[in-house]
Amino acid sequence: MELKPSTLTEELIKLPKEIRNLLAGGMAGMVAKSVVAPFDRIKILYQISSAEFHIQNVPKVALKIYRTEGLQALWKGNTATMIRVFPYSGIQFMIFDRCKTFLLREQEMEYIQLKSIDPTTPKPTWGLTPMQSLMSGMLAGASSVCVTYPLDLTRAQLAVLRRKNDAPNQRFYQVIAKNYTNRGLPGLFRGITPTMMGILPYSGIAYAVNEQTKRRIQNMTGRDVTTVERMVCGGLSGLIAQTIAYPLEVTRRRMQTIGIVPTSGTDAAVDSVGKGSSRAGAAEAAIRTVHPTKPPSMAAIVKELYAEQGIPGFFKGVTLNWFKGPIAFAISFTVFDSIQSTLSTESERKMRLP
């Protein structure tokens, strides 16, 4: 017997708040990532190649992928993304909300204590400080990365592997098994150093900007934040956070995919938009020739990328991120807020902040 939507909602509300936030965050992440998946794949292809990035060439790359691999290839690796993004996004939102709830309860307890001493104590404006938002976001991001990193690694590698002739596509489990066979457990966490270095400012700034802008709007207007305002806040937070952390994302993608595809030439990830901008042939060759059991360090990747493309190489595709990043964040934060509101109890709604 199928549950009616209203009955299903009532049953979900009975779950612990942390589980409800995990589900809401996971669903929000899946919706956002599915919408921007084609842009993500093209961005990764550029990040791990030596081809120069021009925003006007993105349609050409998308069209070539469509002609050579089919429409579904624009979402290649998206199944792995969904497997990864549900726990990644869910854990992130759950931990941030848990930190927020803990800090707000501390504020409430402090107010009650002061009120018992001095009845004239004014009621404070509830909400996290910018520093509290930043630290909570950093903790949420770091925790979600640690749990789901092997899935992110597999997804990135699937996104750059191209189907040749009639060869079958590599499956998710085949790629993750190969990583483990080649290097053992460390092989599943290849590139995690720049990922952790990037997620701390990325997640911290994203949650802080989103939280503080929504709080500012509520304080200024005296009402709840509208859906459009939530989307604008989410988009702004994504734009700022992704731009700051972008060089580390490029480094991470190189570490994850190096040795899988060449960085230039006819077999490169992107070979339809002109020659690469390599400034040092030796450095380019060093990047292309990698032993699977002994990939280069983060320092070597940074040095070689700089030799190959200079500073612009660390920001390759950032303009595409300025387009798709705010869209993804706007959808993610807004969908989470909507689902969380729907699954909130009456007492939680009364205490709910933006």
Image (cartoon, rainbow, N blue to C red):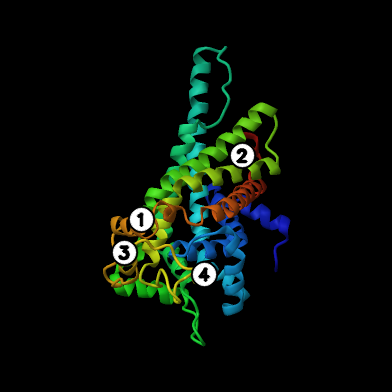
Horizontally, is 221 left or right of 208 in the view?
right
Asked whether the beta carbons under mark 1 and mark 4 sit within 8 Å of each other, the answer is no
Q: Nearer the viewer, mark 3 or mark 2?
A: 3
Residue wearing tag 1: 306
Whether label 3 touches label 1, CB < 8 Å:
no
Q: Secondary structure at mark 3?
A: helix
Residue plotted at (36% across, 58% down): 305
Mark-to-mark CA distance, 1 and 4:
28 Å
Residue 302 lies in quadrant: bottom left
Instruction: Provide the secondary structure element on which disc 2 rests.
Output: helix
Query: Label 4 near label 3: C-beta < 8 Å?
Result: no
Q: Is residue 257 visible?
A: yes
Q: Earlier in the sequence, mark 3 or mark 2?
A: 3
The residue at which mark 2 appears reads as 348
Please determine whether, in this image, residue 242 is positioned above or below residue 348. Answer: below
Mark 4 secondary-structure assignment = loop
Given residues 210 and 62, the one toward you in this image is: 62
For image coordinates 64% across by 55% down, the residue present is 11
- In the rendered image, is residue 144 in sight? no
> Is mark 2 in CB contact (under 8 Å) with mark 4?
no
The residue nearer to you, when weighing 6 against 321, is 321
Q: Is residue 257 above or below residue 32?
A: below
**Is residue 225 toward the left or the right of residue 19 in the image?**
right
Is there a contact, CB below 8 Å, between mark 2 and mark 1? Answer: no
Closest to the observer: 208 or 126? 208
- The amino acid type found where label 3 is placed reads Ala
Residue 77 - label: 4
